[in-house]
Image: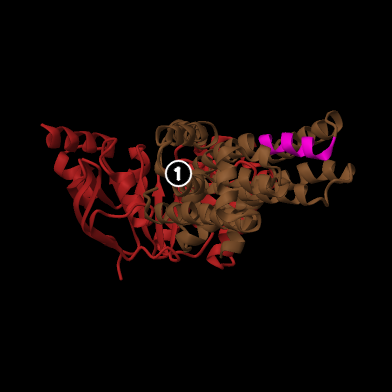
Amino acid sequence: MTGTLLRSVLKDSLRSRWVVIYAVFFALITEGLLFFTSGEARAVLGLMNIVLLLLPLGSMMFGTIHIHDSRDFIELVLVQPVKRSSVFHALWLGIVLPFLVAFTLGTSIPLALHGKLLSPLSAVLLLAGNLLTMVFFALAFVVGLTFREKATAMGVGFLVWLLLGVLYDGIILAVTVLFVDYPMEVPTVTMITANPIDLARIFIMLTFDQAALLGQTGAVFRQFYGSALGSIVAVTCLLCWIGLPYTVALRTFSRRDW
Amino acid sequence: MRPGADNLVKRFGALTVLNGITTEFFPASVTAIVGPNGSGKSTFMKCALSLVTPTSGRVYGFDRSRAGSMAQTGRYPDNLTPRDIFALVQSIRRTPAPYKDTLIETFDLGSHLTKSMRTLSGGTRQKVGAVLALMDDVDILLLDEPTAGLDPVAASRLKDIVAERRLQGATVLVTSHILSDLQELADRLLFLLDGKIVHDGSIDAVLSTTGQSTLERAVATIMTRSTS
């Protein structure tokens, strides 16, 4: 049943101009960075900042809007003999898959045109971007299903992004300065694990293997796990960051009144 | 099993929307559920359709595979066409939808089948909703403000189809603010006020008890009595 519903949600999403705009945006940014900056590393670094900042914001906003704009569709299918969980899986996949494809194609085509697509750095960047997309769409569904007003949901979604994407590093820094006399390795690694954007950044940086670019938190993470294990831990934690909010959103969806 | 509700209570936070509704609905009948705004009509319909979970009590007998429903607002995914939506519901219900083509013709939807829903007028969307509710061979119909937004021709055709389904044995529940429609369609009136049934009886009985000639005036009389 999920497949039947998914086809309809996908058809609706793929006809939306936002998916195309999203793909074109990433294509233009990637092409611009590759064209105007010298060297693959610089271009990918620039792209990393876009991926770590704008991609979570985009996923969060599109996710919350999607769940609110799908209300009538949800009511239409929930009155049919269908399980709520099937509707939820279809709704989530139906919005995530087009955005994953849009990001991957938008970024890959310019990388391929410049002969950079097959480098490990590009692969890691694409993987991190895809994981972050899924994380933030799952979080967006939690927010969108919890707050019934669309404007409130979007506001809360923005605050979640602001906290994780902008304020969080400052909070970690403040905590480490505050407790400078104490061993802070474990708390720092724990705090990084609690932020998917930090995890994605460290995952990309561990592939770069340049200590100077890791930052203080990244350095602690690498020191704690080492580069190879660190990458595995980061990806595993990111997968948990998809699974946990997805489960919470599914539970909320199954119990919610429409 | 006949569909019905047993001591149905629904609260949204501190607000009690349905307060101990107990009733049953009969085959080959049209029950009009009326009441002022916020009286619990739509919430009752949503409980019957499993869109809302009761706080206590239960609704029973509204098996979704046996029921067709029409929502108050005919809004659907913007980028899908009526044809897509009919196909989706057909494949979910695994039904040949025996009445679909006739209904498309009746509501003059043929030229709109391949247009995006966002380009359709409110009335046309409501017609799509009518086709969805009636295209399958169901024995329960839940219609929430079915004629709202429909032009007089389409509204009249819809009422004819509902009357026909009733004669075929369907159990029909309908809410509407257009009481003349209900007087034409329904044989039973369920009047809700503050989530409670304050009147339950045949339309004729309502008219004779209140001494009024139209349902609109009869309902106004009940409302005045109940609130004073």
Q: Colour of chain B?
A: red
Chain under disc 1 = A
Q: Residue furthest top?
A: A36
Way the structure is coloured: by chain
Q: Nearer the viewer, residue B163 or A16?
A: A16
Relative side of B60 to A70, left or right: left
Q: Secondary structure at mark 1?
A: loop
Picture quadrant of residue B26: bottom left
Pick the front one: B207 or B219: B219
Which quarter of the figure is the N terminus of chain A placed in? bottom right
Q: Colour of chain A?
A: brown
Task: Relative to B28, say whether A256 is above or below.
Answer: above
Q: Position of residue B52 (x, y in %)?
A: 34, 52
Magenta stretch containing residue A84, yes or no?
A: no
Name the residue rendered at 49%, 65% in the picture. Answer: B137
- Whether residue A49 is in magenta: the answer is yes
Left or right of A33 on screen, residue A202 = left
The residue to which callout 1 is attached is A184
Q: Residue at x 21, y 45 (%)?
A: B195
Q: Is residue A101 visible?
A: no
Tag 1: amino acid: Met
Predominant secondary structure in magenta?
Answer: helix
Give the magenta range: A39-51
Q: Please tell me how many numbered marks the rendered image carries.
A: 1
